[in-house]
Image (cartoon, rainbow, N blue to C red):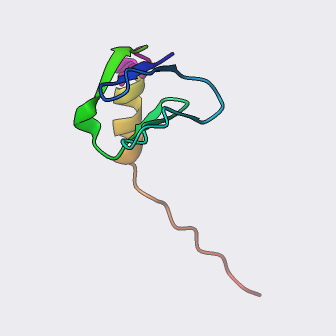
Amino acid sequence: MLSVRCKICNVELTSSTKSQSCGCPNMMTLLGDKVTAMDLNEVVLLKTENNSKNSHTLTRNDLEYQENRRKRKVRKLDFEVR
């Protein structure tokens, strides 16, 4: 959930699935977790929800397995045509 406020008109918007706008000349628009405006210096983020994903989802054993797999040689099979 994201809450933002326009410094020009003091309108606070809370994120939803619908597009919302403050209506002043700055035209601050909020759609989901995206904020746009003519001048983003006039926009204040009030509340943000940190949905940071863990970049280390693989364990050490998984990473080691992938490294060993990457180093494998490809064997070519020769077939006789009769």
Q: Main secondary structure of the magenta part?
A: loop
> Which residue is pictured at 49% across the width and 29% down the height?
33
Q: Quadrant of residue 69?
A: top left
The outermost residue toward the left is 41
- The location of residue 59, given as percent across then percent down, is 39, 17
- Residues shaded magenta: 50-61
Vertical side of 16 occupied by 42: above or below: below
Q: Quadrant of residue 52?
A: top left
Relative to 17, residue 81 above or below = below
Q: Nearer the viewer, residue 64 or 3?
A: 3
- Residue drawn at x 33%, y 47% is 38
Relative to 15, is 36 on the left or the right?
left
**Number of numbered discs visible in the structure rendering:** 0
Spot the residue most to the right. Answer: 82
Residue at 39% of width from left, 49% of height from top? 72
Q: Where 40 sits versus 80, above or below?
A: above
The residue lying toward the viewer, choosing from 78 and 38, is 38
Q: Nearer the viewer, residue 33 or 42?
A: 42
Q: Residue furthest bottom?
A: 82
Q: Position of residue 14 (x, y in %)?
A: 52, 18
Q: Position of residue 36 (x, y in %)?
A: 41, 41
Image quarter where the C terminus lies is: bottom right
State left or right for residue 56 relative to residue 1: left
Please give the name of the residue rendered at 39% of the width and 19% of the height, measured from the top-left corner.
54
Residue 64: x percent and y percent?
34, 28
Residue 59 within the segment the image draws in magenta: yes
